[in-house]
Image: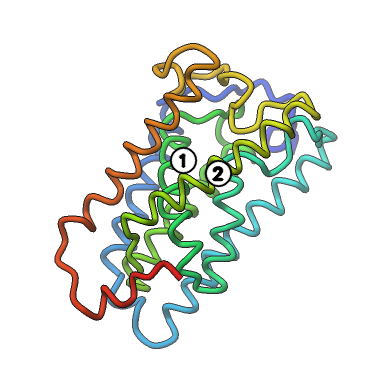
Amino acid sequence: MSRYTDASSPDAFIAYSQPHLIALAIFVALVVLLYAGRHWLSEGKRSRYGRYVLAVVLTASELSLNAWYVAENVYSVKDTLPLELCSLSLYLGVAMLLLRSRFLFQIVYFAGIGGAVQALLTPVLYYDFPHFRFIEFFAAHIAIVLAALYMVWVERFRPTLKSIFITMGFLNVALVVVFFVNRITGGNYMFVAGKPDTVSLLDYLGPYPWYLLSMEAAAMAIFLLLYWPFAIAPSSPAKKRSDTGY
């Protein structure tokens, strides 16, 4: 089993290798399937069961990841606390799905999709398929995106322009908290203390610490892009009443 779980596995992840491209193809296929089945899923109790299934997938991925940290003796407050953007989105996503929370949906839609899609395209990952970490990484990030889209396509939630500023506020508060956690632990959560050593969007945002300001502009641009389909789509009075964000 060491090939599949060993923390010192020699099989290094290679961006846009065959396993990576297959994982991205699975991601696209699942998004298409979710959209195609949105009406069927919205009937009766299916919408609730669908939310529960996604919540279980997200929870299982996080529990299995932490079990792997402990089993492989790599758990460390410096590197393995759930303080990355996608980790926060995962926890909020589980709560959103279980509570059917419109408020949490705003954050998961923008921060979850924006962060998870970037992670899928430029993974900070060191293990190739069929290692557990490869499978868990893609399963978790794909599920984050599916959870947000599920609330849009099945539950009929819609973000508002105000939702962007709520999300930006949440992220900036999180960045301040993470900054001090990094100072205490010596970690680099949310890449506040430096860029990752793998290719990422941050490579195009300038040197440290100036890229932190560029991150703000990039996040706003991504969020506006994610909001654009709703800005141009017609909205019925019923939908407008449901767009309170609560």
Residue drawn at (53%, 43%) of the image: 171
Numbered-mark total = 2
Badge 2: how crowded within 10 Å, few (<14), some, or many (20+)? Answer: many
Element under disc 1: helix
Q: Amino acid at mark 2?
A: Cys
Residue at the top extreme, as displayed? 207
Crowd tier of the residue under label 1, counting other residues whose Cα lies within 10 Å: few below 14, some 14–19, many 20 or above: many
Identify whether 31 is placed above or below 242. Answer: above
To which residue does mark 1 refer?
Answer: 115
Q: Name the residue: 53% across, 19% down.
A: 198
On screen, 78 above or below 141? above
Q: Which of 30 and 244 lies nearest the eye of the viewer?
A: 244
Q: Quadrant of residue 80?
A: top right
> What amino acid type is highlighted by mark number 1?
Gly
In x, y percent, where is residue 225? 27, 43
Camera-nearest residue between 231 and 143: 231
> Answer yes or no: do the residues labelled 2 and 1 have beta carbons within 8 Å?
yes
Please name the colour scheme applied to the rendered image: rainbow
Q: Which mark is residue 86?
A: 2
**Which quadrant would residue 38 be assigned to in this image?**
bottom left
Where in the figure is residue 113, as x and y percent of width and height? 42, 48
Mark earlier in primary sequence (2, 1): 2
| Residue 163 position within the rendered picture, expressed as x and y whole percent measured from the top left | 39, 56
> Helix, strand, or loop for circle 2?
helix
- The residue lying toward the viewer, choosing from 87 and 3, is 87
Task: Look at the image and tell me in which quarter the N terminus lies.
Answer: top right
Residue lying at 75% horizontally and 26% vertically, measured from the top left: 183
**Residue lying furthest bottom:** 44
Up the image or down, 181 lies above or below 107; here it is above
